[in-house]
Image (cartoon, rainbow, N blue to C red):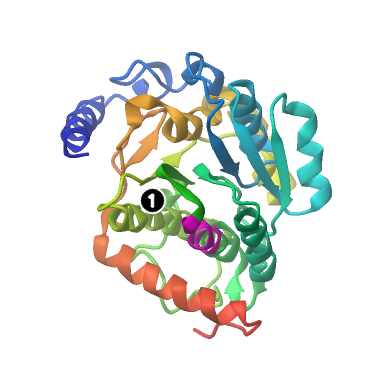
């Protein structure tokens, strides 16, 4: 793993030296992959027949494309969706063994049921892709006293991964889908430890960025806790993609996004590439605690590298998980 850390530092230095804005969209990175690379392309030489990979938010957008490509390469895929019907609807695109499971990441009881099902079946998981997410809810919504984006995007995944740790294979990979929003839209001082309820000056985009910063810090702290093992954890930015995440945007922004799409948005096949690459590619065996975009290393924000903030968030996440698992509301 130390060898990979030295290699990662070199690649990050090379990537950060590519300053011109246009390079982010038209050029490839040091590994030959880039903005336009698709999930099929990053896996074209891979045989995943001996791998079992769990994907959250598997019924649409990036999740659905991720399931399709992993199945194409022979993996057994456990596809999670908010309802049984949505999970079972994915089966039609999978040519290999597919296990549909219902898991609403805003409901701790359902997360526990899902994890228990996997454990009771004796399934060994080689990779978890924490892909599910909701974005920019126009008005403050809460469950169990927690702002809904933070609850679904971070706490739900934190709980799921925590409960499934005993099922992980020796060299399992955890890939957490974060976003550049962790820097662009988050709060100036990082995680709001006194405002998990979201009540203080709610802003849809800042709340989303807040949850994405939490995703990144979760992956970083998990990687630190994996250091004595061969298991790894990384975070990714998939790019800006027109998916169902935009379902909560107002009509004007939706119309504007159509205009911008051709210039700056990835399609779903391109958007799924980074999470599939990080979760499966042999070149990244041993890579941990990193942040990837366009299938290459990317430097996160200052808060995204804050180890003390990551540790503090982990401790608070455990407290929130314990509290809401009993049916009680979290109190800031």
Q: Secondary structure at mark 1?
A: helix
| Position in image of residue 256 (x %, y %) | 65, 36
**Which residue is at 22% across, 39% downward?**
1
**Is residue 63 in sight in this rendering?**
yes
| Position in image of residue 126 (x %, y %) | 49, 40
**Is residue 140 in sight in this rendering?**
no
| 85 w.r.t. 119: above or below | above
Residue 324 among magenta residues = no
Q: Quadrant of residue 54?
A: top right
**Which residue is at 32% across, 21% downward?**
29
Q: Would you name the residue on which mark 1 appears?
A: 183
> Is 47 on the left-hand or right-hand side of 16?
right
Q: Which residues are magenta?
A: 157-166
| Position in image of residue 226 (x %, y %) | 32, 53
| 171 w.r.t. 229: above or below | above
| Position in image of residue 323 (x %, y %) | 55, 81
| 245 w.r.t. 279: above or below | below
Count of numbered marks: 1
Q: Nearer the viewer, residue 281 or 290?
A: 281
Residue 162 among magenta residues = yes
Q: Is most of the magenta stretch helix, strand or loop?
A: helix
Q: Nearer the viewer, residue 99 or 184?
A: 99
**Which residue is at 26% across, 28% downward?**
15
Q: Quadrant of residue 107?
A: bottom right
How dense is the environment of label 1, judged by Cα within 10 Å: few (below 14), some, or many (20 and up)? many
């Amino acid at each position: 793993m130390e060898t990979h850390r030295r290699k990662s530092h070199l690649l990050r230095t090379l990537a950060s030296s590519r300053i011109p804005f246009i390079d982010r969209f038209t050029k490839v990175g040091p590994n030959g992959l880039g903005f336009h690379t698709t999930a099929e392309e990053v896996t074209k030489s891979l045989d995943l027949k001996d791998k079992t990979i769990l994907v959250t938010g598997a019924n649409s957008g990036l999740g659905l494309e991720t399931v399709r490509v992993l199945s194409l390469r022979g993996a057994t895929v456990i596809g999670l969706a908010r309802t049984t019907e949505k999970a079972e609807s994915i089966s039609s695109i999978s040519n290999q063994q597919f296990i549909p499971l219902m898991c609403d990441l805003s409901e701790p009881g359902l997360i526990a049921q899902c994890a228990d099902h996997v454990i009771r079946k004796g399934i060994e998981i080689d990779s978890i892709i924490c892909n599910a997410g909701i974005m920019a809810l126009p008005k403050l919504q809460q469950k169990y006293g927690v702002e809904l984006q933070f609850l679904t995007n971070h706490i739900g995944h934190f709980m799921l991964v925590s409960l499934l740790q005993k099922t992980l294979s020796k060299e399992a990979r955890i890939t957490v889908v974060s976003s550049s929003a962790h820097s662009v839209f988050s709060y100036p001082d990082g995680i709001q430890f006194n405002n998990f309820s979201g009540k203080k000056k709610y802003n849809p985009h800042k709340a989303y960025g807040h949850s994405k910063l939490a995703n990144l810090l979760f992956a970083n702290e998990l990687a630190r806790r994996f250091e004595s093992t061969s298991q790894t954890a990384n975070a990714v930015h998939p790019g800006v993609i027109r998916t169902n995440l935009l379902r909560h945007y107002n009509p004007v922004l939706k119309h504007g996004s159509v205009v911008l799409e051709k210039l700056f948005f990835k399609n779903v096949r391109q958007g799924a590439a980074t999470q599939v690459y990080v979760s499966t590619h042999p070149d990244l065996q041993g890579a941990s605690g990193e942040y990837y975009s366009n299938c290459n290393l990317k430097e996160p924000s200052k808060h995204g590298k804050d180890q003390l903030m990551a540790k503090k968030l982990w401790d608070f996440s455990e407290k929130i998980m314990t509290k809401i698992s009993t049916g009680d509301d979290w109190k800031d």
